[in-house]
Structures are given as structure tokens and as C-alpha cells.
Amino acid sequence: MSDDAGSQAARGPRARTRRLMLETATRLMQAGATPSVSEVAEAAEVSRATAYRYFPSQAALVQAVVNEGLGPILTWKSASTDPERRVVELFDTAMPRIEAFEATFKAALKLSLDQWARRQAGTLGGEPAFTRGHRVDLLKDAIAPLKDRLPPREFKRLAQALSLIFGVEVLIVLKDIWGLDSRRMMSVAQWAAGALVRAAVVESIAGGDRSAPTTATK
């Protein structure tokens, strides 16, 4: 396909219909709903058959809306070689965006929890699963300079620990439960992230000094 043909396809009727559905779904999710494909089709005044051609399941629809909400977070890169600085930069890029689309990400989280409950109850059936996991690659990229300094298990553990304070769950804990405003929420998240990175580095240095005594001498 030529560049002109590709550009026309991106602006053609199919692209416009998909965009309309995404914008409609985003509006509904920003209002707190977790809409089905049929509900978005009705709100967008698109036929169900057409809607399901673009998004064959609720999971596919919600994933597309989440990706739209994440936007520049998905293409985040850092030129720094300092892992703590890179984590700060990632949080500076991601958390304001996550907060701006807070309702959307909470609606997606609701779908994930609802599917988990139905799976536990054996009532999910063949419904495609809504998967989450962008933070895994993002956080591993943020701490990439430590990849050669930490054993693989410790590198993975640091990424896992950072994932506990990155994402919409942080807003739920620090804003909804603790009642923090945006500035204080970000301050706590950044402090915790920095502490985790520094602790991992200190551990790696201590672990590398095999000649150091393990107990204090009297």
C-alpha cells in the first residue's frame, strides 16, 4: 500500500467509525461506566454488527480505550543512565496522565476484577480475558541500567516492587484511602520509588563484597 493509500485509509470511513467508537467508549468510561460493545454501539449510533467488527469483545474495546488513555506513556524513553533518574522521569510522565484518565483506568480495573470473580465462580465462559501488563515492560525499561548490576531474580524483584506504586492503584490507595491531593500523592510515590531503587543498589553492592564479615566483631 502506498503512503497516500495508507493515509486515506487512516482517514477513511472505517477509521472514522473506529475513532467514533473509541471516543464514545472513552466518554462513557470517564463517566465511571464499563460499557459493553453493544452499549457503546448504541451510544455512538452504530449498528451492533458494525461495532463487533471493530471490537469483537468488551475486553478488546476496553483495552483499546486504555491504550488511548495511556498515550505517550507507552512510548516513554529516557536518555539517562541513572536508574533512579529514569524512574523519576517515568513517574513524571505517567502519573499525571494516569490521573487525568483516572476514571477510565478505574473502569478497566473494575472489568478485570469482575472477570476474576466470574472466573472464580466458573461463570466467565469463553469470554476473552482483559489483560493488564504495560507497567511490566515500562518499569523494566526504567531500571534497565541495573540489568548488569543485579542478579536476574533481584532485577525482577525490583520491577515487581515498583509495580506496587505505579498505576491507577496508587491513586486508589493514596487519594481515595489516605485522602492525599495530587501533589502529595506524587511526592509519596516518587519517594517510595526512589527508596526501592536505592535499596536494591545498596543490596547489590553489599552482596558483591564477599570479603565483608557477616557478623560484627567483638
Image (cartoon, rainbow, N blue to C red):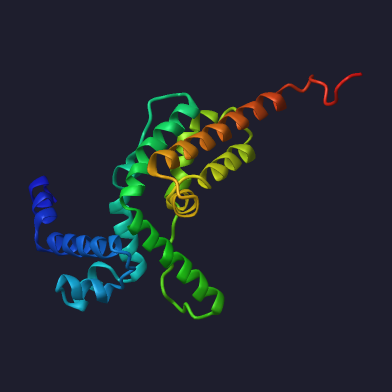
> In the rendered view, does 145 fall on the left or right side of 102?
right
Which residue does the image show at 35% across and 38% down from the upper left? 93
Work out whether 49 lies above or below 160. Answer: below
Q: Is residue 33 above or below residue 164?
A: below
Give the percent coordinates (x, y) of residue 66: 33, 56
| Quarter location, residue 151 | top right
Q: Is 141 above or below relative to 215?
A: below
Where's the C terminus, which quadrant? top right
Instruction: Out of 72 and 126, give the one closest to the viewer.
Output: 72
Q: Nearer the viewer, residue 188 or 7?
A: 188
Where is residue 138 drawn, in percent x and y?
Answer: 43, 42
The picture places residue 38, in percent across and down from the top left corner, at 26, 76
Outermost right residue = 218
Number of numbered discs overlaid on the protein picture: 0
Residue at coordinates 50% horizontally, 76% vertically from top-left?
A: 118
Question: Which residue sits at x=38%, y=26%?
Answer: 79
* In the image: residue 176, left or right of residue 120: left
Q: Whole-percent x and y of residue 193?
A: 52, 36
Question: Which quadrant holds residue 111?
Answer: bottom left
